[in-house]
Amino acid sequence: PELLAEATTAVTAAKRAGGDRTALFRGEVAEGVRRRALVERRLRAALAADALHVELQPLVHLASGRLKGFEVLARWQDDALGRVGPDEFVAVAEGSGLVTALGRHALRRGLHALVASGAAARGLTLSVNASPLELRDPGYPAAVADALAEAGVPAASLVVEVTEGVPVAPGDPALGTMAALRAAGCRIALDDVGSGYASLTYLARLPVDVVKVDRSLVVALGDPRSARVLEALVRLSRSLGLVVLAEGIEHEAQVRALLRAGATLGQGWLWSRALPVDHLADLVARDAAAHPGPPPDLPTSLLPVAALAAPSPALASQPVASQPVASQPVASQPADGVPVQRAARREEAAPGA
């Protein structure tokens, strides 16, 4: 029985690693499998009890420094496990079928925070991460519509962020889901652009409005070669009618370089880490005092959507207000980069976040 249990543990580890693999039983393998099983059990219970919480990170209009929206990030503090990092619990959720429940939890909590803080009334937006599994779920558009209706937030205030893991084959259900969301007024953002090898393919095939430049390119802006790569990516994105948002900004010099390159929005520790929900109202009030009036809108992306899929009936009933995307005050910078369209991830990312 003990040998059989060890063999089963090794097989489980090999399956989770993916592909055609051979795995040997080792103590650390068994510990990893046990840990994953424990996290899955506790996560399932936490989702059933609505025990996870969210934090929101500001998104900033680079040229004006005003708040444009927030990205919602799931957080988990478990009684038995302590703080579980998003890298761990998101991976477990994706491998156990819990990612849909996790994403919907983050969406509902994020929309509630947007309203309670006064951000929704100011026309600010919410960005939420959606996994490939969620986008292939036929019930996802209806779930989004229900969450928006429950919160009283227009579809135009929601930005759905996707990554390079999203299928791009013609006819894939994920493409239809994105097109339906977009046709109803939601924005679609392609996250972590520049971190992998398939970004250009995804830009060409996905119905997106916003390009989120990966932090690795922003951090390397001091290197002339890397700066030219980023500038080329921004020019390409703008030529496609897309808004460019840069992640991982920590220094004012990066803001100036991004404005010169033509980026529109930013996110990073220069302005704020992800904030607890009860800190948002004060931030929104301070931004409103510094920048009276509604935030400037960003034009709709020029990419066509009609040929990609018919809009979801559930989402089609949502009000479509002409609202922008993203975030908080930064010191005024020269407006070398003129805002293009609208825009919308990640501090320590989680889905639906």
Image (cartoon, helix red, strand yellow):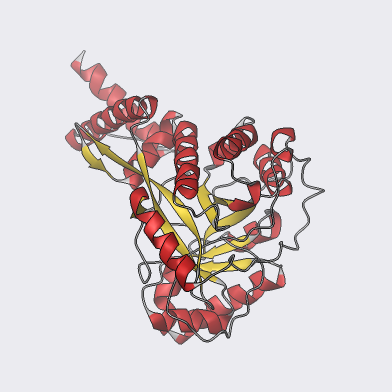
- Residue 265 shown left or right of residue 316 in the figure: left
| Quadrant (top left, top right, bottom left, bottom right) of the N terminus | top left
Q: Is residue 128 left or right of residue 241?
A: left
Whether residue 247 is visible to the viewer of this picture, yes or no, is: no
Residue visible at 70% across and 45% down? Answer: 319
Q: Residue furthest top?
A: 1
Q: Between residues 82 and 334, which one lies in front from this camera angle?
A: 334
Count of marks overlaid on the render: 0
Residue at 56 percent of width and 84 percent of height: 335
Q: Is residue 17 left or right of residue 163?
A: left
Q: Residue furthest right?
A: 307
Q: Relative to the observer, which residue lies in front, 120 or 170?
A: 120
- In the picture provided, is 303 more to the left or to the right than 257? right
x, y percent for residue 53: 35, 40
Say above or below: 160 vs 49: below
Residue 162 percent across, percent down from the top left: 56, 50
**Relative height, residue 39 to residue 68 (above, below):** above
Pick the front one: 64 or 72: 64
Coordinates of residue 30 in the picture (x, y in percent): 22, 31
Residue 111 shows up from this direction: yes
Determine whether 25 is above or below 182 in the image: above
Query: Where does the image place residue 89, in percent across and percent down from the top left?
Result: 34, 39
Residue ID at (41%, 49%)? 73
